[in-house]
Image (cartoon, rainbow, N blue to C red):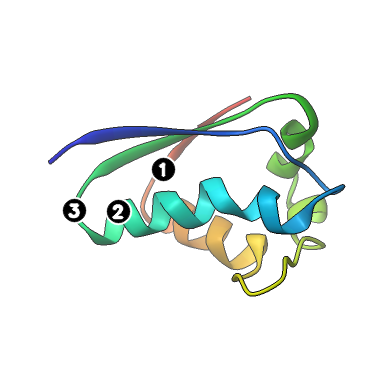
């Protein structure tokens, strides 16, 4: 099992890119790896539930759903 850290730098200005750290972390967890996420810059506000609930990229799951998965799996987020 590997430990993988994902860094998000995109926020509400680019919903699809904002989703990627959460989506990649989910994939890694599903594959049996331990993950963490760092949100910096424009991505920092995504830690708020009210903002995460508004993010829906093109062709990717919603950030809200991925955040719920993150909570269930105890994935640590650092801002």
Do labels 2 and 3 touch, CB within 8 Å? yes
Lower sequence index among marks 1 and 3: 3
Q: What residue is shown at x 30% (from left), y 53% (from top)?
A: 29
In the rendered image of this protein, does residue 74 appear above or below residue 54? above
Quadrant for residue 55, please give it.
bottom right
Mark 3 lies on residue = 32
Do labels 2 and 1 touch, CB within 8 Å? yes
Do labels 1 and 3 touch, CB within 8 Å? no
Of helix, strand and loop, which one carries label 3?
Answer: loop
Q: What residue is shown at x 76% (from left), y 56% (from top)?
A: 15
In the rendered image of this protein, does residue 17 appear above or below residue 38? below
Quadrant for residue 48, please give it.
top right
Name the spot of residue 72 as percent of width and height, x first. 41, 58
Q: How far apart are marks 2 and 3 (CA)?
A: 5 Å
Categorize mark 2 by other alpha carbons within 10 Å: few (<14), some (14-19), many (20+): many
Name the spot of residue 47 as percent of width and height, x first. 69, 40
Mark 2 lies on residue = 29
Name the spot of residue 35 as percent of width and height, x first. 34, 39
Quadrant (top left, top right, bottom left, bottom right) of the N terminus: top left
Q: Distance between the residues labelled 1 and 3?
A: 13 Å
Q: What residue is shown at x 73% (from left), y 52% (from top)?
A: 49
Mark 1 lies on residue = 75
Q: Nearer the viewer, mark 1 or mark 3?
A: 3
Callout count: 3
In the rendered image of this protein, does residue 51 appear above or below residue 60? above
């Amino acid at each position: 099992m590997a430990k993988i850290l994902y860094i998000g730098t995109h926020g509400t200005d680019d919903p699809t890119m904002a989703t990627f750290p959460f989506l990649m972390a989910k994939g890694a967890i599903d594959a049996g790896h331990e993950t963490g996420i760092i949100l910096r810059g424009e991505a920092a506000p995504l830690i708020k539930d009210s903002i995460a609930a508004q993010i829906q990229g093109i062709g990717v799951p919603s950030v809200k759903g991925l955040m719920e998965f993150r909570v269930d799996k105890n994935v640590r987020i650092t801002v």
